[in-house]
């Protein structure tokens, strides 16, 4: 089980984590906890690796995804 963050509710304007959720068994609980400590109107920023990017190298630069699928992944990374 995931321990609670040692902060009160609505404490921060910005909560970030980078390359953490890939190591967490209960991602939903971790996100709920980050949201709990973020004030209303605040921002939670999560950065995780896109492990599918390595597939491009294995495919000699030819993606196995359609153009619209690639576009949605890029948009997801930008947002």
Image: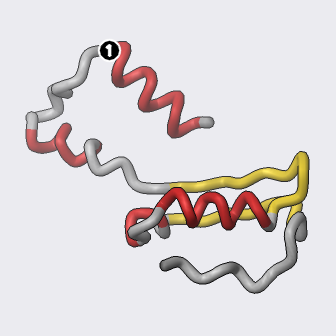
Q: Observer-nearest residue: 37 or 12?
A: 37
Few, some or many residues within 10 Å of mark 1 (<14, 14–19, 20+): few
Give the answer, above or below, for where 43 lies relative to 75: below
The residue located at (22%, 48%) in the rendering is 54
Quarter that holds the C terminus? top right
Which residue is drawn at the image coordinates 46% and 56% (left, top)? 48
Residue toward you, 30 or 62: 30
In x, y percent, where is residue 70?
A: 35, 24
Compared to residue 66, the image places residue 21 above or below, namely: below
Label 1 residue SS:
helix
Q: Position of residue 74 (x, y in %)?
A: 46, 31
Q: Is residue 54 left or right of residue 45?
A: left
Looking at the image, is 73 positioned above or below residue 1? Answer: above
The relative height of residue 47 versus residue 52 in the rendered view (above or below) is below
Q: Toward the viewer: 7 or 70?
A: 7
Query: Does residue 72 appear left or right of residue 40 in this picture?
Result: left
Outermost residue toward the left? 59
**Which quadrant holds residue 68?**
top left
Residue visible at 73% across and 58% down in the picture? 35
> Can you name the residue that lies furthest to the front here?
1
Which of the 4 quarters of the picture holds residue 25?
Answer: bottom left
Q: Where does label 1 land, which residue?
A: 67
**What is the x, y in percent for residue 72?**
45, 24
> Residue shown at 90%/51% (left/top)?
40
Q: Taking 62 as reference, is 28 left or right? A: right
- Report the number of numbered marks: 1
Where does residue 46 sit, x and y in percent of width and height?
59, 55
Q: How is the image coloured?
A: secondary structure
């Amino acid at each position: 089980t995931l321990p609670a963050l040692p902060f009160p509710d609505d404490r921060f304007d910005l909560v970030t984590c980078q390359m953490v959720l890939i190591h967490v068994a209960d991602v939903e609980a971790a996100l709920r906890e980050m949201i709990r400590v973020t004030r209303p109107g605040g921002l939670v920023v999560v950065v995780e690796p896109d492990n599918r990017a390595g597939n491009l190298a294995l495919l000699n630069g030819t993606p196995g995804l359609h153009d619209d699928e690639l576009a949605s992944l890029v948009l997801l990374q930008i947002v």
